[in-house]
């Protein structure tokens, strides 16, 4: 008997969307590398200031993501993808002129608006394009653009910093973000349905909230790693501190390619629990082993957990949504990204300033551990409901 053929996944729109994500998040990676060094150096701040600057974008992005999700369902994905990338490019370019923490934070807030529009529309477009039975695999492959960007962005940023100073980094990042807007035009519009006429205006998809809370804890821990990787690598003796973020992004990419089909074969909440436990273990290693080798090991372990957390939790989130609700489901789930990458660096920055960065990693481990317990409880509840 012939095997049933699987619906195609690798299409022109799918590849173009991944390429746009790659460009956008390469710009993000360049900013992630440069921002803490910029704040502690030319701006004259400390670790707490670096955490505030890093997480500030999440304030505006958090407020706007649910609204962006509704707009993506109402008006389509492409306007938000193009507009979000261009707005991010403008904020990055203007950062080259910033001379105070207040200005940097204001520009990060502006960048958060672009982040909200681009990210929400990108995930909604992916859910439109991918066959439902291959959603986990699609998330794994699509996110290669994100993590390749986070892996490649820091070394590119370091090269530009050495060659032309911080202005070169910010202008280079702006150019790459603008490239993302151009690539999006190849994707086209992917929305297939509109919200039902006269349907009440909803910007939160309530069934997605429990899984989003588990996802949030992984992002708080990841936010701490991303915010302080450059500083901690410098202080633990790395000659090229960008190598830590390169290893982080590279590990996620390898895992996403090698295990792309795992999220479709393992229950999503069980996989999310295992991912959170792995992230917690990595954060413990980072706190306890304060040598270059130790930080690299910790980074690899955390990256393995992150490799599975996003496809696991977004598979759980999209499983709660109909096609006409994908935008608001994406907005609700990705709001956890803003909370995590916003609250994480700010909270852990206030721990790191008086106690040191290793203590910040210890707090991150505890938060990821609590998230694992919460997600395991959700998984048990789901199994019980299925059995009944």
Image (tube, helix red, strand yellow):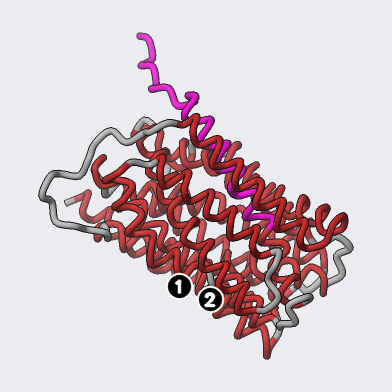
Q: Quadrant of residue 278?
A: bottom right
Q: Quadrant of residue 45?
A: bottom right
Task: Residue at 66% x, 83% y: name it.
Answer: 352
Q: Nearer the viewer, residue 288 or 343?
A: 343
Task: Residue at 50% x, 29% y: name it.
Answer: 186
As drawn, is 62 to the left or to the right of 295?
left
Q: Nearer the viewer, residue 295 or 53?
A: 53
Can residue 202 be found in the magenta stretch?
A: no
Q: Please state the horizontal and vertical placement of residue 349, each as a whole percent of the image.
A: 62, 80
Identify the element where label 1 is drawn: helix
Tell me the quarter of the image containing the N terminus.
top left
**Vertical side of 240 occupied by 350: above or below:** below
Question: On the image, numbered disc 1 is attached to which residue?
Answer: 370
**Vertical side of 263 occupied by 222: above or below:** below
Q: Is residue 144 visible?
A: no
Q: Decide whether the magenta segment is chiefly helix, strand or loop.
A: helix
Q: Please state the horizontal and vertical placement of residue 10, each as a whole percent of the image.
A: 49, 25
As drawn, is 11 to the left or to the right of 257?
left
**Marks 1 and 2: CB-CB under 8 Å?**
yes
Question: On the image, numbered disc 2 is attached to which residue?
Answer: 366
Task: Residue at 78% x, 76% y: name it.
Answer: 41
**Which stretch is magenta?**
1-30
Can residue 5 be found in the magenta stretch?
A: yes
Q: Please state the horizontal and vertical placement of residue 190, each as a whole percent of the image.
A: 36, 33
């Amino acid at each position: 008997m012939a095997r049933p053929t699987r619906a195609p996944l690798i299409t022109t729109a799918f590849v173009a969307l991944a390429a746009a994500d790659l460009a956008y998040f390469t710009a993000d990676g360049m900013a992630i590398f440069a921002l803490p060094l910029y704040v502690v150096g030319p701006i004259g701040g400390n670790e707490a200031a670096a955490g505030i600057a890093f997480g500030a974008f999440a304030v505006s992005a958090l407020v706007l993501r649910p609204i962006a999700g509704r707009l993506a369902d109402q008006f389509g994905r492409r306007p938000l993808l193009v507009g979000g990338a261009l707005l991010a490019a403008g904020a990055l370019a203007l950062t080259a002129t910033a001379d105070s923490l207040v200005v940097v934070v204001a520009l990060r807030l502006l960048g958060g608006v672009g982040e909200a529009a681009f990210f929400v529309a990108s995930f909604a477009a992916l859910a439109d394009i991918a066959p439902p039975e291959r959603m986990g695999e699609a998330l794994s492959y699509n996110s290669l653009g994100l993590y390749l960007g986070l892996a490649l962005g820091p070394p590119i940023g370091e090269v530009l910093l050495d060659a032309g100073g911080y202005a070169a980094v910010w202008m280079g990042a702006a150019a790459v973000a603008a490239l993302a807007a151009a690539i999006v035009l190849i994707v086209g519009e992917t929305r297939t349905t509109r919200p039902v006429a006269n349907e009440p205006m909803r910007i939160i998809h309530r069934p997605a909230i429990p899984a989003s809370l588990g996802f949030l804890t992984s992002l708080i821990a990841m936010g701490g790693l991303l915010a302080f990787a450059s500083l901690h690598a410098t202080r633990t003796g790395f000659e090229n501190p960008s190598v830590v973020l390169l290893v982080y992004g590279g590990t996620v990419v390898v895992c996403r390619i090698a295990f792309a089909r795992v999220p479709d074969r393992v229950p999503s909440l069980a996989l999310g629990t295992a991912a959170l436990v792995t992230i917690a273990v990595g954060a413990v290693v980072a706190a306890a082993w304060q040598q270059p080798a130790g930080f690299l090991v910790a980074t690899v372990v955390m990256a393995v957990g992150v490799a599975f957390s996003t496809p696991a939790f977004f598979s759980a989130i999209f499983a709660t949504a109909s096609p006409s609700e994908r935008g608001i489901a994406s907005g609700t789930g990705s709001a956890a990204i803003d909370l995590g990458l916003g609250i994480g660096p700010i909270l852990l920055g206030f721990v790191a300033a008086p106690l040191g960065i290793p203590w910040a990693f210890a707090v991150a481990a505890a938060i990821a551990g609590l998230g694992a317990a919460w997600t395991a409880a959700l998984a048990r509840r789901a199994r019980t409901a299925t059995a009944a």
